[in-house]
Amino acid sequence: MPTTLTIRHHGQKNGQMQFVVTPFNNAKTTAPVSLNAPNNVTLPNHSNSHLANDLRWYLERFLDDPFEPNTSLAEEIQDALMQWGKETYGKLFQGNIYDWLQETIKLHPRQLIIRIASNDARILAWPWEALQDSEGLILSHTCRIERQLNVPHNPRPLIEKLPTDCVNILLVIANPYENQNVRYHALARPLVELCQRQSVPMRVDVLRPPTFDQLRKVLQEKPGFYHVVHFEGYGGYGTSSNNIDIHNDNHKQPWGRLFFETQEGEIDTIEAAQLAQLINETNIPIAILNICPSTRTDDSVNDPCATIAATFLKTGIHSVIAMSYSLHVRAAQLFVSAFYRSLFQLGSVPEALHAGRRAMLVQPQRFCARGEYPLQDWLVPVLYQQQEHHLEFKTISPSQQATKTVPLPPAAAEYGDYGFIGRNRTIHKLERLLRQHAQAGLLIHGKAGIGKTSLAQGFVQWLQHTGGLGEGVFWFRFDNIRSVEDIINQMTAGLFGTSVPTASTEQKIDNLCAVFKQHRFIMVWDNFESASGIEGTEVTGLMSDNDRKLLKNFLHRLQYGKTKIIITSRSPEAWLSATDCFRLALHGLQGEECWQYCDAVMHGLDLTIDRSDRSYSNLIKKTDGHPLAIRAISLKLAQTAAANLLDTLEQNLNDAEQNEINDAADTVLGLLDS
């Protein structure tokens, strides 16, 4: 049987937070002790900051530049966190409680639950997972740590039996802030990829469109079906404006809220309490929040409902897993795989969280400019739980797990030399464009080698894996096509079969347009510059003016229809009007996705270089994340030191600037070809 030790917030005295400890057997509660808040802990020579902010920098920003003096600062922050954990542990657990705790950890660690109880959002946001004894034994590595409200709010009993054949997940991805520098899709992509591998029996449904009305519709149509609602996006807190009666709240304190999208992709602010009520009413026990921020407020806010996670708890959700900081790509991959595998096997959310955190702990390497570098981010996932609901699953055969998906043409099913890396924010933007715009065409344009085809492939595969393809996919590579007649015939055969009587081109187009306007298909016109040419260059098109007019007319006729055509081209295709297609300029890989790509290139080419040399990082930054330039530089590094290549490149870039040539990627490729 689990044994619980409760650390309860007892108020404030002389400016310090006080706590009491209630032993497992409900014996006499300890006398109050004062604890030092993380935002009162400062590092030597860093008095203008405090541990809470320093920890955020370490977990979210340090790997952007993992060189001196940042590496030394990162070590100082880890040391300060360790000292805070030891000091807090020593003050809380003394005498008989200390002895009992040590014995329990030694004999029955998995049965021990450390429960943090408070009605103060700032207290709940402390890094309690860092509690450790004087020998450095970290509690969260052996036992469970849960957060709850000081006054329990019992969850609503589940009124229906949940499915037992697989874990059913509703994935809500909302991104109304296109330019926010937050890791987006961090958990969503690994979650969908895990589902496709079928290593864990699970089903992932993506909410399309990511509006609150659509969420209400889906959940009310399937009460008792989903085990988990997983939110990926943005949140915050502010004064309530909606008339929501949650335990007689007077709405004078800020409340947590999530930012959904409207049909037009604008911000739609939904109070966390309103959302939690919907989840409760539709019989879902678990919510996972990869929302920035879902557990943090500023120092002036103490109401727990200012955080989304605590609001969910107060409103009656059984278990809430929140990410206290932004997750890196590799950490998300490790966490998702271990969490859902454990959840299916054991049916316990705390045990699954422990498994996910453990996977992050034992594999701390994360992608960055230095290749891979250790980051102690295992404390990012945290559990808010008033009462655990144990899930039951039964093992089924792989054939029973199989789900029907729309097949892809061979060209769409390729993964490229290094797989599909990054572009998460662009994928979400493409999703929005597909549903919002009247134009049938969506033109992705950019330089040769920037990754246009890879993006189209990755997007189509994402749609296939998440049920967004509709009824089928057509893929045409225009560097292999000489006339529109080839395209028309292939589409006609695909829709109507080869036995369709001979018809004129005009009649075939009429038939195709009738189907495509009424039914959802995805079509890709890849390497479209081969058909049209590129203005101002020597690249000329392979198609006649008449064929180009037919293509333009085809796009025009499919306006306001259900089928969408993704066009990739090195040219912005000025001859197509704004009513024919929406244009999306594609740029290089940025941040973590760039370093992940560099890592894949290095492994693919079996190259070994000293990536602790900052010259390599500066060299890659000169490429603006252009994949082809990164590959070219990587090959050059097999013979030339990074510092020497950087010096030569900077001189060439200076010459290019003087000649009013401002494209860094072109200059890099020109240098490397010379």
Image: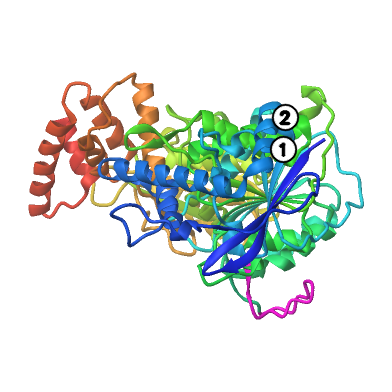
Judge whether residue 657 is colored magenta: no
Give whichever of 615, 207 is nearer the camera: 615
Query: Does 426 sit left or right of 637 as displayed?
Result: right
Which color mode does the image show?
A: rainbow
Quadrant holding the C terminus = top left
Residue annotated with mark 1: 112
Residue drawn where x is 48% and y is 48% of the image: 84
- The chief SS type of the magenta part is loop
Under mark 2, the amino acid is His
Q: How crowded is mark 1: few (under 14 residues within 10 Å), some or many (20 or more)?
A: many
Where residue 100 appears, as percent x and y from the top left, is 70, 36
| Residues tagged 1 and 2 counted as in contact (Cβ below 8 A) | yes
Numbered label tally: 2
- Residue extending farthest front: 95
Task: Locate residue 393: give its quadrant.
Answer: top right
Quadrant holding the N terminus = top right
Q: Which mark is residue 54?
A: none
Residue annotated with mark 2: 108
Q: Residues within 10 Å of mark 2 (few under 14, many from 20)?
A: some
Question: What's drawn in magenta, residue-wise?
Answer: 241-261
Q: Distance between the residues labelled 1 and 2?
A: 7 Å
Note whether 413 is above or below 248 in the view shown: above
Where residue 26 appears, as percent x and y from the top left, is 80, 49
At mark 2, the secondary structure is: loop
Note whether 299 is above or below 156 in the view shown: below
On the question of residue 472 being in view, the answer is: no
Where residue 61 appears, as percent x and y from the top left, is 39, 49
Note whether 153 is above or below 338 in the view shown: below
Under mark 1, the amino acid is Leu
Residue drawn where x is 54% and y is 34% of the image: 360
Residue drawn where x is 42% and y is 43% of the image: 78
